């Protein structure tokens, strides 16, 4: 066995990004079971929120079966060691939502903006730091901007007090080379840790995460069974095994996380998490992964092919959160026919 | 014909104040822009005022208050500045039309509830997202009960100034409140998204409502009629997607193209705010003139 190269902290996203894959229908019983299995396996941080962050419960992003508060409270109750994380997108959720989440037990807050708009998160990052929380800043759709621009935005996050900055490959559009150049730009320019969030739309969820880690990222996201928007995130049990083989420690018990996947998460899945034609198109044209199921719905409603909708959304340079544009595009395509 | 006009002033020569200056000078029927005031002598807006031959000063609100002929003041500063300005204007008996999020006075949308508030000393013009979407919610509410209204405003990054960026929670919370108070939805929710695409996108707004009765034809007619009313003072206001019905959900999409005078066309979010200010200002001024015969 080679000497260990260091510790990589995995933040589980099964009940947040993974919530897209079940259209935000996880129940309190579901999150309790998943959180206790993850905690037992030694997962250090577990995120739970609507897929689009706190207060994502909406026509725009889908109504969740349970409130964020109920799920956060349940997860907090279910874990013994793991820290509980929540996601907030300024413009969707507010500082009030964040305060409520903290009252329910959230210890880590992750604040996400489009990768050119970090300055809208200043108030949220500062308030969270004042509340004594661990705060991560997330730069979404990071494939759309070059490394220098991402570094400029990451430095803003650092100046607000963030404890780490994430490069989010929200569209699953990056490849190992473009991951490396982005991670190393941040690694060289920041004092705080660099983190990475992959999507599997080009089949690179694990490969890109490994590339990020080799380039110096020390925090990475993953979902059990590879759940997540589009073709899903880096598959957590696979990532634990691959990182171990690559010589990194995660503190997660491989056999327990494998069992959690097969016995706890798989029975709760409503569709297979695969790279189908449309999710491949997301990665190839650089479209936000969470658009996938909304696109299928609009395609059905307006009788237009999902591929045509996705390609047009790519052409329009849509950013995360613009789910309403899916209906707009589908409607316009249907009028043309 | 040289009819009588009401003298007005603008506080805050930033993007909004400067755009409003152009609009009042070019289009107002009942107002005469006497002065625009700021606090920086180097302000671009003050230089433009000089070129247009409009009195201007970097002496702040005091410079405006010293002109006793002024009856209406448009406040284009910030919420915190407006809290102070509101007091001073009230003491001086000057009607305040507030374009900041301070909400000292009632929220007003020219085509929805102007009549109720025409005589109050301080009028708040809500957020740009609300000016674009509240009329549609109000139109649907006039047909049937709206149990929930949710709006998504997408704005070009270049058109969102530091005020909006640093107060994004206030934007969503205030807009949600106005959907309830002015739009008459039982519950409101607002989402804002900034898109940095080049060339910059036009302001887009999606309005989702949950309705009590699915009166399709009446809802469509009311929305079309309302859009036409808004177009009278915001020519670039367009229905992108007419009301779509899915059970009790009604989805309507709006696009706002700016007039492209001082501000670029993609700044529909700023244009709708200054257009509302012009419309409200003219209504108030006309009422003043009528009263005074």
Image (tube, rainbow, N blue to C red):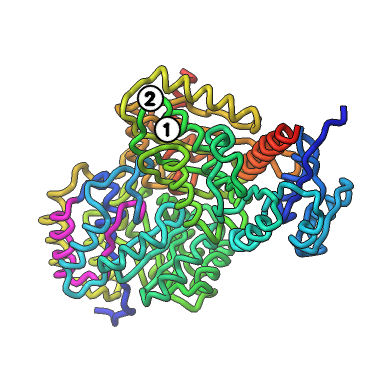
Disc with the residue nearer the chain's start (1 vs 2) = 2
* Residue A327: mark in rendering: 1
Q: Is residue B286 left or right of residue B191?
A: right
Residues flagged by tags 1 and 2 on a common chain = yes
In this view, B208 is above or below A166? above
- Quadrant (top left, top right, bottom left, bottom right) of the C terminus of chain B: top right
For image coordinates 44% across by 50% down, the residue present is: A173
x, y percent for residue A313: 48, 38
Q: Secondary structure at mark 1?
A: helix
x, y percent for residue B205: 50, 38
Subunit of label 2: A
Residue A50 belongs to magenta span: yes
Q: Is residue B83 left or right of residue B282?
A: left
Q: Are marks 1 and 2 in contact (CB under 8 Å)?
A: yes
Q: Which residue is mark 2?
A: A302
x, y percent for residue A3: 29, 82
User: Is B17 in front, or is A172?
Assistant: B17
| C-alpha distance separating marks 1 and 2 | 9 Å
In this view, B111 is above or below A9? above
Residue A208 belongs to magenta span: no
Magenta region, residue range: A27-53
In this view, B243 is above or below B187? above
User: Is A220 in front, or is B243?
Assistant: B243
Task: Examine the rendering and report whether any part of residue A66 can be seen.
Answer: yes
């Amino acid at each position: 066995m080679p000497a260990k190269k260091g510790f990589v902290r995995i933040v589980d996203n099964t009940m947040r990004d993974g919530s897209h894959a079940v259209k935000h229908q996880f129940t309190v019983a579901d999150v309790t079971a998943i959180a206790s299995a993850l905690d037992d396996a030694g997962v250090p941080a577990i995120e739970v929120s609507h897929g689009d962050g706190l207060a994502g419960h909406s026509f725009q992003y889908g109504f969740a079966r349970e409130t964020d508060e109920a799920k956060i409270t349940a997860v907090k109750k279910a874990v013994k060691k793991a820290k509980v994380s929540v996601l907030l997108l300024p413009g969707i959720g507010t500082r009030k939502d964040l305060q409520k989440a903290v009252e329910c037990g959230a210890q880590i807050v992750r604040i996400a903006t489009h990768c050119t708009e970090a300055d809208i998160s200043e108030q949220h990052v500062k308030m969270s730091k004042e509340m004594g929380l661990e705060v991560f800043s997330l730069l979404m759709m990071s494939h759309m901007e070059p490394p220098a621009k991402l570094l400029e935005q990451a430095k803003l996050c650092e100046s607000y007090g963030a404890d780490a900055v994430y490069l989010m490959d929200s569209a699953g559009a990056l490849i190992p080379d473009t991951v490396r150049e982005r991670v190393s730009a941040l690694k060289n320019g920041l004092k705080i840790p660099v983190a990475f969030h992959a999507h599997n739309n080009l089949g690179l969820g694990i490969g890109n995460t490994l590339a990020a880690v080799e380039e110096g990222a020390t925090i990475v996201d993953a979902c059990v069974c590879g759940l997540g928007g589009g073709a899903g995130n880096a598959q957590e049990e696979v990532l634990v095994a691959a990182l171990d083989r690559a010589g990194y420690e995660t503190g997660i018990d491989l056999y327990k996380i494998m069992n959690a996947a097969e016995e706890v998460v798989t029975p709760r899945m409503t569709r297979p998490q695969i790279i189908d034609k449309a999710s491949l198109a997301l990665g190839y044209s650089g479209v936000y992964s969470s658009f996938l199921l909304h696109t299928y719905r609009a395609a059905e409603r307006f009788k237009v092919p999902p591929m045509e909708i996705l390609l047009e959304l790519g052409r329009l340079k849509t950013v995360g959160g613009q789910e309403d544009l899916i209906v707009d595009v589908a409607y316009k395509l249907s009028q043309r026919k | 014909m040289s009819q009588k006009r009401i003298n007005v002033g603008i506080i805050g020569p930033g993007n909004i104040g400067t755009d409003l200056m152009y609009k009042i000078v070019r289009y107002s029927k009942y107002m005469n822009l006497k002065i625009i005031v700021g606090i920086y002598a180097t302000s671009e807006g003050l230089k433009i005022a000089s070129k247009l031959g409009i009195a201007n000063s970097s002496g702040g609100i005091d410079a405006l208050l010293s002109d006793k002929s002024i009856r209406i003041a448009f406040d284009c500063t910030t919420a915190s500045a407006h809290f102070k300005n509101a007091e001073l204007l009230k003491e001086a008996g000057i009607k305040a039309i507030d374009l900041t999020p301070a909400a000292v006075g009632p929220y007003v949308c020219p085509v929805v509830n102007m009549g109720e508030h025409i005589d109050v000393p301080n009028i708040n013009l809500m957020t740009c997202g609300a000016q674009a979407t509240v009329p549609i919610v109000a139109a649907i509410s006039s047909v049937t009960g709206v149990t929930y209204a949710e709006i998504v405003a997408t704005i070009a990054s270049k058109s969102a100034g530091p005020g909006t960026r640093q107060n994004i929670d206030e934007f969503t919370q205030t807009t949600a409140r106005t959907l309830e108070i002015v739009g008459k939805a039982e519950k409101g929710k607002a989402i804002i998204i900034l898109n940095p695409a080049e060339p910059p996108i036009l302001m887009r707004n999606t309005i989702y409502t949950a309705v009590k009765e699915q009166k399709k034809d009446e809802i469509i007619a009311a929305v079309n009629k309302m859009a036409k009313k808004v177009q009278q003072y915001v020519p670039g206001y367009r229905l992108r997607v007419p009301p779509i019905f899915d059970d009790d959900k009604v989805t309507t999409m709006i696009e706002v193209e700016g007039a492209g005078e001082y501000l670029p066309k993609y700044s529909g979010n700023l244009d709708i705010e200054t257009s509302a200010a012009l419309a409200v200002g003219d209504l108030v001024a006309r009422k003043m003139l009528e009263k005074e015969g």
